[in-house]
Image (cartoon, coloured by chain):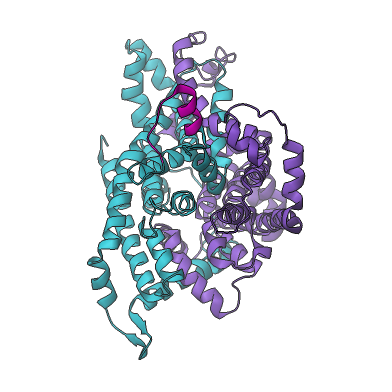
Chain colours: A purple, B cyan
């Protein structure tokens, strides 16, 4: 933990040169690749992919096709496009509404959470202020409390001030990400040289300007990481909206899909498993795409966080 | 991460990087202020209100009155609650070691550099983390189906009759599988990120001493990432005790196997939203929170002492 940093710094720079081709390896040349190890690890890979492949195939099937065909192959009818069109059209296009709601919760909730975490992490890393230790202790202590234990009292408090069944009921609790605060604190103490802040101040920049023009650009990889993880948390949130929202018009996608699935269980409910599955696929794709496209950022952000663990 | 921070912070101040701070001033509050304010609204206020609620009881006749610790006495003797606690306890003891074990093996395999296409492995195993619990549960729930699901397909293709994963006996294991699927990759990434910063001079020294791969793992790699292992364990403990999404969603597909008091959290939820017993619900939630904190604390103590 604490030992990693100093040892890492004391590594003589000379030794870096011969390792250029395989920077991480201690053995001269690369370690021999192992087919056996690849196959064994491949089992976990197949396990991770299996449900997603199943979902991909299932989204191409009609309600009847789902029942009659093998799960990991196509049905005789290829209904993917029809399913997608139906998903968007079903119940007067409520899926689009849910998608827009989810985007609202992500942009305001996850975006806000990231902004607060960046500001707070910067403060913890670079300032000494009265009550800092108390802030720290309270945040840590409260985080150990199961979040779901807070949900019921939060609901009751929000209903007293008329916030339940409005977007705010989902957005406001999403604004706090203790994990994000921690990550930004670690990241900011590494990434921002205090001398640079001093220089900016000597040049007459105010605190806000120092933050936005000096600190914020240096915090970019950490910010992207926190943004991705808060986005996942908000996009995938189920418990909070389940408690806070009664009106389907404010549902996020997760709650909407759950509602479509539940209606199959009611006596005269319309069974739309094919739409539940196609909707699921459409819900998953944006996040997977975001993770794949931004992997360079969040991976560097995460490993920076682990230096201090 | 959370419970570990105090010790990390203590370790930092003497040995940490020479962060030259400006003199103590209130400036920092300008930056931490917004977080602190929202935190007070969504964490501290509900917490205080929860404690307040747990000390009262609302009855049809007589309204709300102060009952002291009576609700707590009730909770401690509530067999529905304790059944749920033991269920998540069992879940914890079996699912968490399997999940973290697999995650660790994959992280070590990727870090060893002996895999073909290790980047592909890293990304793909992590992908399920991006899948919402709702979607993950629905997918697995349908696949579990013995009539139309993948289990049914296998049954008819091979002419066998696999046990129903959604039956009362197996449903906890089936939920464990869903949770494992969701979080193996996430934990793998935590371990892998920790492995990457192990200083290479250590490996070189071990090689000079003639240590084999296995010895390098047990003597260098595992001790070096002990912090990450403890953090992942604490997160998993908290996650197990909070189990709600997966059973709540699966309940519609397995109504006979999953009761509304299946886990303590589910019980809390049912008490408050189906039973309108908010005061008792708050009490159960607090008791569960205290149990969670105690277990997380014990894990941290044990984890930090081992081999330290």
The answer to whether residue A202 of the structure is visible from this angle is no
Image-based side of A183 in relation to B2, left or right:
right
Asked if the stretch drawn in magenta spans residue B163, the answer is yes
Image-based side of B183 in relation to B35, left or right:
left
Residue at point 41%, 16% (across, down): B204
| A224 or B170: nearer the viewer | B170
| A193 or A303: nearer the viewer | A303
| A89 or A134: nearer the viewer | A89
Image-based side of A30 in relation to A218, left or right:
left
Image height check: is A284 above or below A138? above
Image height check: is A225 above or below A77? below
Asked if the stretch drawn in magenta spans residue B5, the answer is no
| B17 or B156: nearer the viewer | B156
Image height check: is B74 above or below A182? below
Q: Residue furthest bottom?
A: B62
Residue at point 53%, 53% (across, down): A181
Residue A228: x percent and y percent? Answer: 62, 45
Residue B190: x percent and y percent? Answer: 47, 36
Q: Which stretch is magenta? A: B151-165
Image-based side of B143 in relation to A250, left or right:
left
Image height check: is A13 above or below A234? above
Using the rendered view, name the quadrant where residue A104 is placed.
bottom right
The answer to whether residue A107 of the structure is visible from this angle is yes
Residue at point 33%, 79% (across, down): B55
Residue B117: x percent and y percent? Answer: 57, 18
Residue A10: x percent and y percent? Answer: 46, 27
Residue at point 51%, 71% (across, down): A155
Q: How many marks?
A: 0
Using the rendered view, name the quadrant where residue A163 is placed.
bottom right
The C terminus of chain B lies in which quarter of the figure?
top left
């Amino acid at each position: 933990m604490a030992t990693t940093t100093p040892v890492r710094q004391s590594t003589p720079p000379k030794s870096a040169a011969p390792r250029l081709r395989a920077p991480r390896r201690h053995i001269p040349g690369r370690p021999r690749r192992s087919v056996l190890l690849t196959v064994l690890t491949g089992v976990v890979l197949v396990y991770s992919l299996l449900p997603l492949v199943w979902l991909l195939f299932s989204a191409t099937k009609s309600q009847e096709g789902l029942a009659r065909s093998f799960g990991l192959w196509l049905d005789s009818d290829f209904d993917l496009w029809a399913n997608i069109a139906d998903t968007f059209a079903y119940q007067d296009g409520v899926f689009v509404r849910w998608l827009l709601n989810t985007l609202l919760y992500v942009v305001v909730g996850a975006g806000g959470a990231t902004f607060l975490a960046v500001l707070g992490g910067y403060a913890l890393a670079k300032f000494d202020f009265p009550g800092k230790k108390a802030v720290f202790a309270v945040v840590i202590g409260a985080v150990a409390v199961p979040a779901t234990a807070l949900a019921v009292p939060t609901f009751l408090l929000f209903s007293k001030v008329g916030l339940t069944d409005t977007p705010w009921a989902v957005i406001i609790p999403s604004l706090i990400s203790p994990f994000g605060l921690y990550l930004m604190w670690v990241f900011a103490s590494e990434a921002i040289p205090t001398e640079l802040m001093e220089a900016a101040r000597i040049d007459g920049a105010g605190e806000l300007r120092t933050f936005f023009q000096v600190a914020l650009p240096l915090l970019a990889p950490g910010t992207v990481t926190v943004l991705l993880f808060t986005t996942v948390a908000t996009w995938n949130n189920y418990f909070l909206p389940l408690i806070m929202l009664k009106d389907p018009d404010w549902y996020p996608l997760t709650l909407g899909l759950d509602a479509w699935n539940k209606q199959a269980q009611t006596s005269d409910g319309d069974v739309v498993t094919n739409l539940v599955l196609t909707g699921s696929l459409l819900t998953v794709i944006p996040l997977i795409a975001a993770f794949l496209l931004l992997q360079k950022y969040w991976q560097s952000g995460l490993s920076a966080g682990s230096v201090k663990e | 991460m959370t419970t570990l921070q105090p010790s990390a912070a203590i370790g930092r101040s003497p040995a940490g990087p020479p962060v030259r701070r400006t003199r103590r001033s209130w400036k920092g509050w300008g930056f931490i202020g917004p977080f602190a304010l929202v935190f007070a609204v969504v964490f501290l206020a509900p917490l205080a209100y929860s404690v307040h609620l747990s000390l009262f009881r609302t009855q049809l006749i007589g309204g709300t009155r102060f009952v002291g610790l009576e609700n707590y006495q009730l909770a401690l003797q509530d067999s529905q609650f304790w059944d749920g606690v033991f269920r998540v306890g069992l879940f914890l003891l079996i699912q968490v070691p399997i999940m973290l074990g697999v995650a660790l093996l994959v992280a070590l395999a990727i870090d060893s550099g002996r895999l073909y296409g290790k980047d592909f492995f890293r990304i793909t195993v992590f992908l399920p983390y991006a899948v919402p619990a709702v979607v993950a549960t629905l997918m697995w729930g349908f696949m579990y189906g013995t009539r139309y699901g993948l289990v049914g397909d296998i049954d008819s293709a091979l002419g066998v009759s696999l046990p129903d994963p959604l039956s009362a006996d197996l449903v906890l294991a089936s939920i464990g599988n869903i949770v494992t699927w969701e979080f193996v990759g996430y934990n793998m990434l935590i371990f892998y990120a920790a492995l990457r910063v192990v200083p290479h001079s250590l490996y070189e020294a071990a090689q000079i001493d003639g240590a084999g791969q296995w010895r390098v793992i047990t003597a260098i790699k595992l001790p070096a990432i002990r912090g990450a292992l403890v953090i992942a364990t604490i997160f998993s403990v908290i996650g197990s005790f909070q189990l709600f999404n997966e059973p709540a969603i699966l309940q519609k597909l397995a109504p006979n196997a999953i009761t509304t008091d299946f886990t303590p959290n589910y019980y809390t939820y049912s008490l408050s939203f189906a039973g309108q017993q908010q005061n008792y619900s708050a009490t159960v939630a607090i008791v569960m929170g205290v149990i969670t904190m105690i277990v997380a604390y014990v894990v941290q103590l044990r984890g930090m002492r081992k081999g330290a």
